[in-house]
Image (cartoon, grey):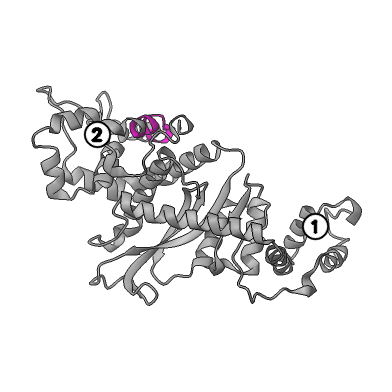
Amino acid sequence: MLIGEFADSIGIRSTSRISAKGMAPVIAILDSSEVLFRYDMDRKPGCRELKFTAVQMMTMVFYVEIKKLDVPGYIETFSGRGSQIILRNLGMPKDGRGRYIAPSVGWLSDFRNKEWRKFRKALEEETREAVLAMSEKTVYTVDSTPVEASRYSAWADFNPHYRIRMAKAHIVMVDGIPAYHRVTNGNKGDNPEFLKILDEMGTGSVPSAAIHADGGYDSAETYTKVFLSTGKVMRGNPGCNAVFHKEYGWDNMLRRYARLHREDGFVPTPQASRGFVLRFLAGHGQDEAVGWFLRNLDICRGSKARADGARRRHVCETVHHGMKRWVDLTVRGLCRRYVGTRVSLRIFVCTILCVLFKPYSG
């Protein structure tokens, strides 16, 4: 996927300034996707062309989402005056009379609610790899954001903090670009969902400069999993009264490590790096101790590092706020079984927009 070539191509972080003609970078990115190409090959009827390709459908989805078109607005936009110019700029096909056509309301709805599921994971993974390839050093930020539901949506939890019925999007960003996410009901805890995302990221060295989180992710298990996934000490936001656990100092870690000298793969202490020691301990039932040690390191960061962490978290919150301006990031009026699907689609739209827009400087 050719993402890096179009990064920072739009100077103003607003979808209101994006016209159908301005969708050209989005179309070019989608057109370079191997996942969408394979999806078309799998569904293409024998000896016939597809009426609408996956790129054309995704382009229409992008346009509808950023313009926040409902059904009457969609019909008016693509059947009224000037609609042919819009459809031409969006790369839509022609009918037998030579006129540009738009997908029907029913097919667009079916594509968003059902077809998107078939290639979603693969397309998100392809996009994530392209985003990570844009920079050798990346900064991860993790936080959740409320996704408002209707007050009549009985399935949605009432969140006493936000005082609304809502779902929740748990998002991990890479340099301000959404990379991983999970959608839950409104009262699900942030930390358990982040741990599931870390399982999805897997263990191994993920190239990163740092990973930033707020106080809601302050747990030994999280510090350990972040270290195993990224090789870095999570930059959390421990409170001013956070307890420093002296019993989990480095000397204690070395003593715990020395007790495992009979285990396979053990390396004598002088030859073992700190990272190897911590990974070895975590792999032999000492993950909680490793987490408390890493938390101690985080607590000991200086004021400059803490200020940088606060700035990074502020950028994360700002991007969340921007995403809700760019698309209708709510679940009002959605059928319950399509909530996760539609939110994931809108977050993907925001991911591409984050690439195209100039980044926040913090």
**Tag 1: amino acid:** Val
**Tag 2: amino acid:** Ala
Magenta stretch secondary structure, dominant: helix
Cα gap from disc 1 to disc 2, whole angstroms: 55 Å
Q: Residue at horizontal 69%, vertical 61%?
A: 302
Q: Residue at horizontal 83%, vertical 53%?
A: 265
Q: Residue at horizontal 40%, vertical 45%?
A: 120
Residue 144: tell me if it is visible.
Answer: yes
Which residue lies under the disc numbered 1?
277
Q: Is residue 242 above or below residue 276?
A: below
Q: Residue at horizontal 57%, vertical 56%?
A: 199
Q: Position of residue 114 (x, y in %)?
A: 30, 49
SS under mark 1: helix
Q: Is residue 157 above or below residue 261?
A: below
Q: Which residues are magenta?
A: 26-36
Q: Quadrant of residue 80?
A: top left
Q: Is residue 306 above or below residue 186?
A: above
**Disc 1 and disc 2 in contact, CB within 8 angstroms:** no
245 in magenta: no
Q: Count residues near mark 2 (Cα–Cα under 10 Å), then give few for <14, some for 14-19, many for 20+.
A: some
Question: Closer to the camera, 360 or 189?
Answer: 360
Q: Position of residue 193 (x, y in %)?
A: 50, 63
Q: Quadrant of residue 100?
A: top left
For residue 94, side relative to residue 7 (left or right): left
Which numbered tag is attached to residue 20? 2
Mark nearer the viewer, 1 or 2? 2
